[in-house]
Image (cartoon, rainbow, N blue to C red):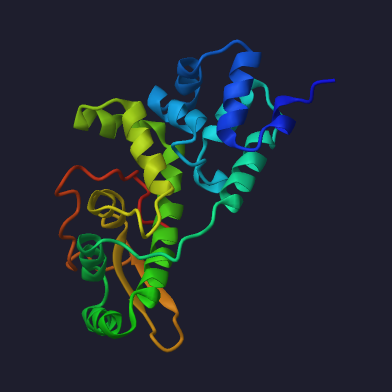
Amino acid sequence: MTLPASKQSSTVGELLGRRLKEVNRSAQQLAEVAQVPATYIDDLISGSRRAPLPARTDIYEKMTSFLRLGRNDLVSCARSERASVAVSAGVGPEAAVRRLLLDLCEPATAKVLEKRQAKRGKDDLVDFIQRLLDITQGAVRRLLDDQVSLRLAAGQRGISYEVLRLSVLEFLDATPDTLTTDDVVQFVQPRIARWDVDLETKVLRVALRGQEPRDRGRRGLGEARPAITPDTDGEG
């Protein structure tokens, strides 16, 4: 007796490819349901794109319903797939990204971090950036539930809703190593007003936009392109 597709597959791509054949559907149809470009689905199936974190995406629920899979089949595959990939030591973000993030840090702390990096390497800074990224991604994740804001932003930029959704999904899966300057301008700067860290206790303090006096710097917000921010941006 043939096992269900979910039991045969070890990766999200394998499960998607097999199940599409079983239900006689195309990758294009699945992309339309997941509201992403068809290339995104193609990349998942081919394995050239890693499966996104279940907590940082909404595509698994959409795909599960369309493909009539078990409730946790895709999520289980994604977690297993990501757990099986060795975690790199982490070289941290490129210099331009690091500079933008340090510009958001309290100046005195930023100077100390730069000096420490020169002497000790990037480990401490990468850890702080990862935690800052976690906070930002948590806020950005809510955008996926706000179709109105995303569609308006897509129209303002002259791009499709699916392409803009993909940029959000890609940021939600970013790491300090893969973070780009565009990610910082588009997602981090509009949400993080200032951050600081107690270098002794390693306690990170983050002020979100809307939690600081309005006369404090708001420079750089959306200068490269309009920021994607819902009406409730900066809350919580």
Image coordinates of residue 101 in percent, x first then y, are 26, 65
Whether residue 43 appears in this view of the structure is yes
Image coordinates of residue 221 in percent, x first then y, are 19, 53
**Looking at the image, which residue is at 27% across and 73% down?**
105
Viewer-proximal residue, 107 or 118?
118
85 above or below 32? below
Viewer-proximal residue, 94 or 48?
48
The answer to which quarter of the image holds residue 78 is top right
Relative to 6, 50 lies left or right: left
Viewer-proximal residue, 210 or 136?
136
Of the 4 image quadrants, the one containing the N terminus is top right
Image coordinates of residue 23 in percent, x first then y, are 64, 13
**Looking at the image, which residue is at 56% across and 44% down?**
54
Image coordinates of residue 187 in percent, x first then y, are 31, 51
The answer to which quarter of the image holds residue 194 is bottom left
The answer to which quarter of the image holds residue 125 is bottom left
